[in-house]
Amino acid sequence: MLNQTPNLDLMFQALADPTRRAIIDRLSYSPASVSELAKPFAMSLPAVVQHLAVLESSGLVTSQKLGRVRTCQIQPEALSLAEQWINDRRTMWVKRLDRLGDFLAETADDERP
Amino acid sequence: MLNQTPNLDLMFQALADPTRRAIIDRLSYSPASVSELAKPFAMSLPAVVQHLAVLESSGLVTSQKLGRVRTCQIQPEALSLAEQWINDRRTMWVKRLDRLGDFLAETADDERP
DNA sequence: TTGTTACTTAATTCTATGCTTAACCAAACT
DNA sequence: AGTTTGGTTAAGCATAGAATTAAGTAACAA
């Protein structure tokens, strides 16, 4: 299974909501049922279930149902996509800053008497 | 200046759109004017300007106007907030997986004859 | 001074999101 | 069998998001 195309849009969209990040934090501690996850929030259970759907479609969370209880857990590999996107940009930017630094150093050299 | 509270909601929201990520990629290469940034996109200039506003309010991009040209550039430190959030979760998850590994190893030990 | 360039502002439209309540279903108790 | 528990489905609503077009402003160029 596990057949969703990992997608940066869905990923970042999923992370852009504080409720969803709180759910992720809760699941970082241990897997949990839907109603356990819903308990801390001042919103209806269907609302939480909708957040879970967003998290699942992003690939960050998976779940399976046993009896009448659905248990949710983190999908640790999922974050690596977002992580890599960010890391790539950061290193690119740092490189550019380095080149700028070199250029400024050279310019300073030229201006030395 | 630079007085926006860095905010994960705004940050991830800003990153959740492909046009905005493309703008970031373009700016990773070098600073650019608004119309330069707009050129590659099949949308109106005001639409791009609105994307730029989102990027600016997230802190990822800054700009200043000189004459009639507004020049935009990446704010490299801005990404570190998102980066850290992700890294924190990843390490937490890995730790938990390690503990699970230890537990399974112990269990295996117990079951050894 | 007239035109062109480079935005800026405003109004509008359409869709997506986040939430609600109400009704429903099926597993687990009593 | 009847009730509670855990979750699901569906419909509706209000706000936010992504785009448009049209009109306006300010800098620079001829």
Image (cartoon, coloured by chain):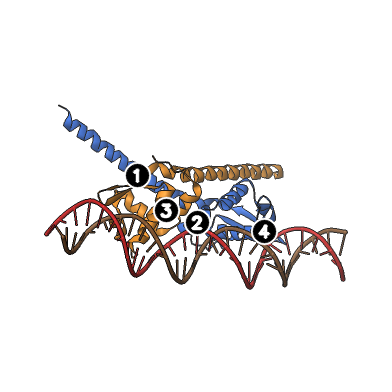
Chain colours: A orange, B blue, C red, D brown
Q: Which residue is mark 4?
A: B45
Q: Which residue is mark 2?
A: B13
Q: CA distance from mark 4 to mark 1?
A: 43 Å
Report crowding for label 1: few under 14, some 14 to 19, many 20 or more residues within 10 A (C-alpha). Answer: many
Residue A54: give its label: 3
Q: Which residue is mark 1?
A: B93
Mark 1 / mark 2, whichever is N-terminal: 2
The kind of residue on which mark 2 rests is: Gln
Residue placed most toward the observer, B4 or A106: B4
Q: Report whether mark 1 lies on the same chain as mark 2.
A: yes
Element assignment for label 4: helix
Element assignment for label 1: helix
The kind of residue on which mark 1 rests is: Trp
Q: Report whether mark 2 lies on the same chain as mark 4.
A: yes
The total number of labels drawn is 4
Q: Chain of mark 3?
A: A
For the N terminus of chain B, give its image quadrant. bottom right
Q: Report whether mark 1 lies on the same chain as mark 3.
A: no
The kind of residue on which mark 3 rests is: Val
Q: CA distance from mark 1 to mark 3?
A: 20 Å
Up-down: is B27 above or below C19? Answer: above
Q: Is residue A58 visible?
A: yes
- Name the image quarter holding residue A40: bottom left
For residue A109, side relative to residue B101 (left or right):
right
Residue A21: give its label: none
The kind of residue on which mark 4 rests is: Leu
Up-down: is B2 above or below A88? Answer: below
The residue at 31%/40% (across/down) is B97
Q: Chain of mark 2?
A: B
Residue placed most toward the observer, C19 or B64: C19
